[in-house]
């Protein structure tokens, strides 16, 4: 076994060179893994259908959900709202919601509750989800994103507020970017 002059005469140089080569290889490996993970998340986002629920009246509440849906879609999420899905002739809201569950197979039901607005419609939808999937599974599929000033006991009926298993995340009222960040993190958490 021969040692090079550099390693014998200056062992610290060879260790330093080895260290920088090892760091470069490690950085490349981490970078490759991060790219692979990003690709995996991108594919998962497309396969992970989210139904965005919330109050549809007044128009400002509906507009907020539409803006949130648009912002989340630009981040690669597959988001739908009942209002944008065509209602068939003579179809009731109940029948439409059940059809959406069957045709779209959402994996997450994200309820957006904004300042000073109730969520009575979402309470009814949560009840239907519990009926369809059972309480344990439904609660794992439902997430609530609410403004910090929202009193959930007023926004939802007592039946919903007693479902402790539903994850509730709060965002800063009147801060759209914070709301979207909280919603995005909530979806990513639900994906894992």
Image (tube, helix red, strand yellow):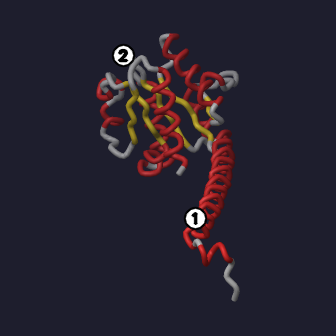
From what the image shows, is residue 2 above or below residue 25? Answer: below
Task: From the top left corner, tell me how far across and down residue 34 is, in percent.
Answer: 62, 51
Residue identified by numbered label 1: 16
Left or right: 175 in relation to 91? left
Which-is-in-front pick, marks 1 and 2?
1
Residue at screen point 38% across, 37% down: 168
Image quarter where the N terminus lies is: bottom right
Residue at screen point 50% across, 11% down: 60
Q: Depth check: give the residue in front, 135 or 81.
A: 81
Residue identified by numbered label 2: 116
In whole angstroms, how far apart are the C-alphas of marks 1 and 2? 62 Å
Residue at screen point 40% across, 28% down: 171
Task: From the top left corner, tell me how far across and down residue 100 is, in percent.
Answer: 63, 35
Left or right: 164 in relation to 128? left
Task: From the top left corner, tell me how far across and down residue 129 is, in percent.
Answer: 49, 41
In the picture, residue 154 is in which quadrant? top left
Rate crowding at label 2 as few (under 14), some (14 to 19) or many (20 or more) other CA atoms within 10 Å. Answer: few
């Amino acid at each position: 076994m021969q040692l090079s002059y550099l390693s014998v005469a200056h062992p610290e140089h060879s260790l330093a060179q080895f260290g920088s080569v090892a760091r470069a290889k490690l950085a490349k490996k981490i970078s490759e893994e991060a790219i692979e993970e990003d690709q995996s998340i991108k594919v998962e986002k497309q396969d992970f259908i989210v139904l965005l629920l919330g109050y549809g009246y007044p128009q400002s509440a509906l507009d907020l959900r539409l803006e949130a849906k648009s912002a989340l879609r630009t981040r690669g999420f597959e988001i739908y709202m009942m209002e944008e899905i065509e209602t068939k002739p003579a179809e009731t809201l109940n029948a439409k919601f059940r059809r959406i569950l069957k045709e779209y197979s959402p994996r997450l039901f994200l309820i957006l509750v904004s300042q000073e607005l109730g969520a009575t419609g979402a309470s009814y939808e949560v009840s239907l989800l519990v009926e369809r999937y059972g309480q344990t599974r439904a609660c794992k599929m439902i997430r609530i994103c609410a403004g910090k000033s929202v009193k959930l006991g007023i926004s939802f009926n007592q039946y919903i507020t007693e479902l402790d298993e539903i994850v509730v995340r709060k965002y800063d009222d009147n801060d759209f970017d914070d709301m979207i960040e909280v919603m995005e993190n909530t979806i990513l958490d639900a994906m894992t």
